Image: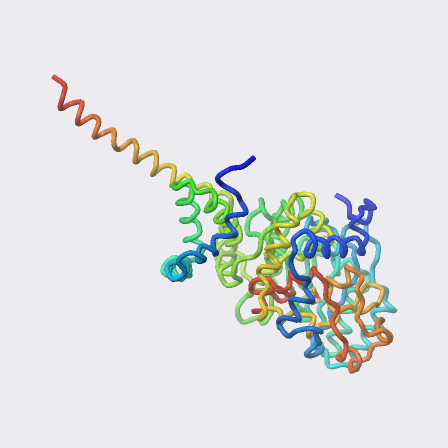
């Protein structure tokens, strides 16, 4: 079956430089620096990336950062808690807009 | 759980393993063979740089049956080194510059001549490392004094602990292993191992519990130090991050879990020429329970003896001739050269 997403495409990510190399080079240099040890550890950054991957629901990123967090020695509990953080923020972001709905309803109601 | 050997599993045949690895890399994945990769890095044929470490495999007998074991060790393995072969090892050690004797197995302590052999090596002035699986210390009262024995002879203890929690450790090494390992680590700490100022070295070995590569040794060491101290009040010196080599029971795991090709591809694509320069076979010689010589413990398990036909047994040990040998390489070697590299002493790059 043909699908838009092919797991093999993840390995081709580095090749996006075939079209517009200077921008790709800049992006990957930036990417590499973002994930290096800094004020946050590479391990903490990997857990953040895993959570964000679930928020943007990118199957490539979920694949890549499931492996990366495992390699960085994260436990399954840590990985799932990171995703719950994403889910909580995502759910909360919907719910907090309920205030907007309430404001409107109150404005229009007697 | 039984060894592949006891199960008459097809992977207990070493030719089959080598064939699967070669076919996997070259035909299935279309990737270069290890020898070619080394040639491109200017490292073929690969030659030793020195003879420093003598790694002695005292036998395949073990109290555990870990899923990833490259030795295919277990309680059902009866092959252990005799005292005569140990005497031959001692004769070779006496006339060579190899300063470190690295004892492994199986569980080396299960060999009845183990303690005598340690004492003799120390009497020769050699530094002795024992690869202790920890649980052996608490397996039977006759082993409870091992920490004291190690202390007395100033033995460096190197022990596997794949993770600082029970879940991951037990999945790889067997139910209850984590609990027993913690108990053994505390016993080692009590006699001074891992404690500042004692000089008694206790180093841990991390290896991934699955089909992935290890992270940076430094960051894993920080995590292990923090978790073991906070949760169990355990201290240790160093942590070695080791890559699982795709042979024996780990190869069986890779194939049966559908991870073989993905793992090999990852190893090949992570080939690091700097790590390749520092592979441990360049300064190590490995001897099997029956006295045969190999470039490393992995080659030993694949029955690939040293390429020095007149000196393949410890009784024919000749340091000069062995220094001139070419190291026998095959596709499992990709496990030593991936990422930061991997050896019995951890990362190599
Ligand atoms: S990995 Fe070590 S402890 Fe586990 S079965 Fe093999 S020799 Fe024994
Ligand atoms: S597997 Fe053995 S021979 Fe091959 S590179 Fe590693 S240490 Fe050397």
Establish if A108 lies above or below B282. above
Quadrant of the rendered image containing residue B326: bottom right
Q: Is residue B224 left or right of residue B31?
A: left
Q: Residue furthest front?
A: A19
* Image coordinates for residue B134, horizontal then vertical, percent: 66, 56
Establish if B64 lies above or below B130. above
Q: Residue furthest top?
A: A110
Establish if B63 lies above or below B301. above
Quadrant of the rendered image containing residue A19: bottom left
* Image coordinates for residue A51, horizontal then vertical, percent: 41, 44
* Image coordinates for residue B16, horizontal then vertical, percent: 79, 53
Residue at x 48%, y 49% (from the top left corner): A65
* Image coordinates for residue B113, horizontal then vertical, percent: 81, 64
Establish if B227 lies above or below A77. below
Image quadrant occupied by the N terminus of chain B: top right
Q: Is residue B62 left or right of residue B219?
A: right
Q: Nearer the viewer, residue B114 or A75?
A: A75
Q: Is residue B152 left or right of residue B11?
A: left
Residue at x 50%, y 45% (from the top left corner): A63
Q: Nearer the viewer, residue B169 or B180?
A: B169
Residue at x 64%, y 47% (from the top left corner): B259
Image quadrant occupied by the C terminus of chain B: bottom right
Q: Residue furthest left?
A: A110
Q: State how many labels appear.
A: 0
Q: Decide if residue A78 is in sight here.
A: no
Q: Looking at the image, what colour scheme do you see?
A: rainbow
Ligand 1: give its quadrant.
bottom right
Q: Nearer the viewer, residue B311 or B114?
A: B311
Q: Decide if residue A79 is in sight here.
A: yes
Quadrant of the rendered image containing residue B45: bottom right
């Amino acid at each position: 079956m043909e699908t838009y997403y092919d797991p093999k495409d993840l390995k081709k990510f580095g090749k996006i430089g075939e079209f517009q190399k200077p921008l790709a080079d800049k992006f990957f240099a930036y990417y590499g620096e973002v994930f290096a040890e800094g004020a946050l550890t590479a391990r903490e950054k990997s857990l953040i990336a895993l959570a964000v991957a679930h928020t943007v629901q990118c199957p490539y990123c979920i694949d890549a950062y499931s492996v990366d967090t495992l390699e960085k020695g994260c436990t399954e509990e840590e990985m799932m808690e990171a995703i719950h953080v994403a889910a909580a923020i995502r759910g909360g972001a919907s719910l907090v807009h309920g205030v907007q709905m309430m404001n409107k309803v109150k404005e229009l109601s007697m | 759980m039984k060894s592949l050997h006891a199960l008459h599993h097809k992977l207990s045949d070493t030719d089959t393993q080598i064939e699967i690895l070669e076919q996997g890399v070259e035909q299935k994945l279309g990737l270069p063979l290890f020898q070619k990769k080394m040639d491109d890095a200017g490292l073929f044929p690969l030659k030793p740089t020195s003879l420093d470490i003598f790694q002695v495999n005292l036998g395949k007998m073990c109290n555990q049956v870990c899923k990833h074991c490259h030795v295919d060790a277990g309680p059902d393995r009866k092959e252990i080194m005799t005292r005569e072969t140990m005497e031959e090892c001692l004769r070779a050690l006496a006339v060579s510059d190899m300063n470190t004797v690295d004892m492994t197995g199986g569980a080396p302590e299960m060999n009845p001549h183990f303690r005598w052999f340690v004492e003799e090596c120390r009497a020769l002035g050699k530094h002795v490392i024992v690869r202790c699986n920890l649980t052996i210390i608490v397996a039977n009262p006759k082993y409870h004094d091992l920490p004291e024995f190690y202390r007395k002879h100033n033995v460096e203890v190197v022990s596997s602990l794949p993770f600082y929690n029970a879940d991951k450790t037990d999945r790889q090494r067997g139910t209850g292993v984590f609990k027993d390992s913690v108990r053994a680590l505390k016993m080692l700490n009590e006699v001074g191992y891992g404690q500042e100022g004692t000089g008694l070295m206790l180093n841990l070995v991390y290896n991934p519990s699955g089909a992935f590569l290890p992270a940076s040794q430094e960051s894993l060491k920080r995590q292990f130090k923090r978790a073991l101290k906070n949760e169990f009040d355990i201290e240790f010196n160093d942590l070695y991050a080791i890559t699982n080599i795709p042979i024996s029971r780990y190869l069986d795991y890779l194939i049966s879990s559908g991870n073989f090709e993905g793992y090999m591809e990852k190893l090949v694509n992570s080939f690091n020429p700097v790590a390749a320069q520092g592979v441990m076979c360049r300064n190590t010689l490995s001897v099997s329970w029956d006295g045969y010589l190999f470039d490393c413990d992995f080659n030993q398990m694949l029955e690939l003896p040293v390429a020095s036909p007149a000196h393949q047994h410890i009784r024919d040990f000749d340091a000069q001739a062995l220094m001139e040998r070419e190291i026998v390489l095959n596709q499992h070697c990709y496990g030593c050269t991936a990422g930061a590299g991997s050896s019995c002493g951890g990362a190599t790059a």
